[in-house]
Amino acid sequence: MFNLNAFLSYVIVVTFTPGPNNIMSMVNSGKFGFKKTFKFMLGVASGFFIIMLLSSFFNLFLFKAMPQIQIFMKILGTAYLLYLASKIMGFDLIHWIMGKEKEASGHGAAVMRSFKTGMLLQFINPKAILYGITIVANFIIPFYDKTYQLILFALFLSLTALASVCSWGLFGSFFNKFLSKYEKPFNVVMALLLVYSALTILGIA
């Protein structure tokens, strides 16, 4: 029998706790405002929706393939989170590696809060992928297997993700003056949270 309470508890805890999506939404909203960050949030929800659909329709395949791709996903996800952390702290890792001077333009900041960045982040976010696999395998597939049901569940989970990033984004937007005043220490803390997320992926933290 489908356990609604257990399902909702798992969804809320995993979705609303700190993670790359929520942290990036809060940081971008604090710097650029909620409205300019909303595209990123829609990207997160869209990418999340696709991940949930893939987890639903290819659940058995993913379970078989995961042991082979898990190490690759951990390395890729960790590298990307560390890259995002470096961007938050104002350090362009790519330019440093290539020995180039950082160009004084807003292009990098615009990319960080774009729809595309929010969507693509989901595909190299092991937390989102593993969440999709576990919630589909344990709560959905055993009780619902019709196409329209899987689509509705994916839509619900993506809307929950949108609600989460919007909540974190509003927090960042409302405390904009405070964040502006303490921008450097705040960015350091947020960057360290991303580093912590990266370390948990590797099983270090």
Image: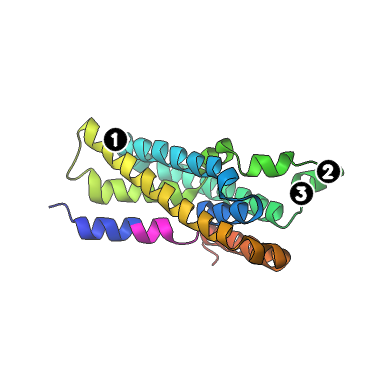
Badge 3: residue crowd in 10 Å (few <14, some 14–19, many ≥20): some
Amino acid type at image mark 3? Asp
Amino acid type at image mark 2? Ala
Query: Which numbered mark, 2 or 1, is in the foreground of this view?
Result: 2
Q: Which residues are magenta?
A: 12-18
Dot 2 falls on a residue whose secondary structure is loop
Q: Residue furthest top?
A: 147
Disc 3 and disc 2: Cα gap in Å?
Answer: 11 Å
Residue 70 magenta-highlighted: no
The residue to which callout 3 is attached is 92
Q: Quadrant of residue 187?
A: bottom right
Dot 1 falls on a residue whose secondary structure is helix
Residue at 18 percent across and 56 percent down: it is 3
Q: Which mark is residue 104?
A: 2
Front residue of this view, candidates 200 and 21: 21
Q: What is the x, y in percent for residue 35? A: 56, 45
Vertical relation: 77 (above or below) 13: above
Disc 3 and disc 1: Cα gap in Å?
Answer: 39 Å
Amino acid type at image mark 1? Ile
Q: What is the x, y in percent for residue 88? A: 68, 55
Q: What is the x, y in percent for residue 181? A: 71, 66
Q: Are dots 3 and 1 in contact, CB under 8 Å? A: no
Which tag, 3 or 1, sits closer to the chain's start? 3
Which tag, 2 or 1, sits closer to the chain's start? 2
Residue 13 magenta-highlighted: yes
